[in-house]
Image (tube, helix red, strand yellow):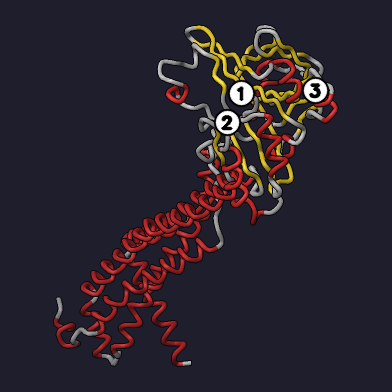
Amino acid sequence: MKRLYRIQAMFKTAKRSLQMHKLRSLLTVLGLVFGVASVIVMLAVTEGASQESQRQIASLGVNNIIVRSVKPSDNEFGEGQSFRSIEVAYGLTYDDLRRINDAMETVVGATPLREYQQELRNGSQRLYGRVVGVMPSFHDSNRLTMARGRFVDDADLKFNANVCVIGEEVAKQLFLFENPIGKSVQVGSQNFYRIIGVTRYKTPSAGVGSSLSAQDLNKDIYIPITTDRSRNGDVITKRVRSGYSRERMQLSQITVQVRDTALVKPTAAALESLLTGGRSQRDFAITVPLDLLEQAAATQRIFNIVLGATAAISLLVGGIGIMNIMLASVSERTQEIGIRRALGAKQNDIVMQFLFETAALSFIGTFIGLWVGLATPSLVSWVTGMETKITAWSPLIAASVAFSVGMIFGIYPAQQAAKLDPIEALRHA
């Protein structure tokens, strides 16, 4: 009962001391407020960006291997030759697709596509978009959803159907407020395709890997890959400043599905050897989403450590601020300490008194910092559109470290107060 009374008395004294210097107490706790908030906000922004990046990589499929056609440099075709003056042949072929399916025992499927940029028209409305020759499986592998109509199916592939599916941005810019289903869109100078579906808006992806660039699927137009080959052949003609360039490329990409995640990396190595054989030039690149996912996770851990250490400096500054204020408080209250000692207070009582005040400052700073830190990520998302994610452990770590720092830096002033000689303290003016 006596101990409880002493604790209550110390608490009241600490409260009265802080209330007597409200502005000083507020400025003292600001260091911890900003320290705690910065730890939570920095980690929330980093975690959100990391999860978005990993989600985009995971959408490529952790069991997949993506092989892309890559245009070699001019020198690989011979000195003095240019893409504009000759028909350049490079990239993946249907023969490569057949060899992958026949020779790779760990492969359960290989999905090809061909893509190229073309001008899309509907009357006076024009848009420069990406034309993609696809198979029906493209819909699921890229996690597309339909806003209207349907996607390309097996019957369209079999009969080389003159149909297409357009992205939401294409529908908005070419058809404004009309329903595009059943209407035709002009691709290039002479091809027309009947629209059978419109895909729902999908957030554009950032580039991942050395061979995969950023993509905006909302500006795509999808046609059956068999229709693309029967109409356009294997040669893609593009307008350039000096005329036209002609590139012979059968396939832009082959997505290889592997039977088991554990077999992805060995299969990628075997695929490298298979495609390199018989080639005179390096005209393809292999991307393994599983590797990218592991790299992204490792990078996230490094960023967490770096940003956490940076934010921890704010906590250190906050702790130093508490120590400075408490040392000033000891100097101001020297005579008060002398009176307490003369009336029978022990050194331990003086230490506990100042630690109570330090604990109060640390608790207030940590508490306010937690609320600011938990509220700010939502504000950042609303203002910038960036995704943020508060992990369960970041507020706990920030709060525990902040409170501990405040208490540790408060021990020294408390010990200095307790060591004052009572007689000298009473003489202090």
Left or right: 250 as drawn, with respect to 145: left
Residue occupying image coordinates x 25% and y 80%: 417
Between 93 and 257, the one lying in front of the other is 93
Circle 3/circle 2 CB separation < 8 Å? no
Lower sequence index among marks 3 and 1 = 3
| Quarter residue 325 falls in | bottom left
Read off the residue under disc 3: 196
**What label does residue 63 carry, if any?**
none
Residue occupying image coordinates x 66% and y 49%: 63
Instruction: Report, in whole angstroms, how far the alpha carbon at label 3 lies from the one at label 2.
Output: 29 Å
Between 161 and 314, the one lying in front of the other is 161
What crowding class fits label 2: few (fewer than 14 Cα within 10 Å), some (14-19), or many (20 or more)? many
Residue 358 is situated, as x and y percent measured from the top left of the image, at 36, 72
Lower sequence index among marks 1 and 2 = 2
Left or right: 418 as drawn, with respect to 69: left
* Secondary structure beneath label 3: strand
3 vs 2, front mark: 2
Three-letter amino acid code of the residue under disc 2: Ser
Lower sequence index among marks 3 and 2 = 2
Circle 1/circle 2 CB separation < 8 Å? yes
Three-letter amino acid code of the residue under disc 1: Met
What crowding class fits label 1: few (fewer than 14 Cα within 10 Å), some (14-19), or many (20 or more)? many
Taking 154 as reference, is 79 above or below it? above
**What label does residue 249 carry, if any?**
1
Residue 429 is situated, as x and y percent measured from the top left of the image, at 14, 76
Residue occupying image coordinates x 36% and y 62%: 315
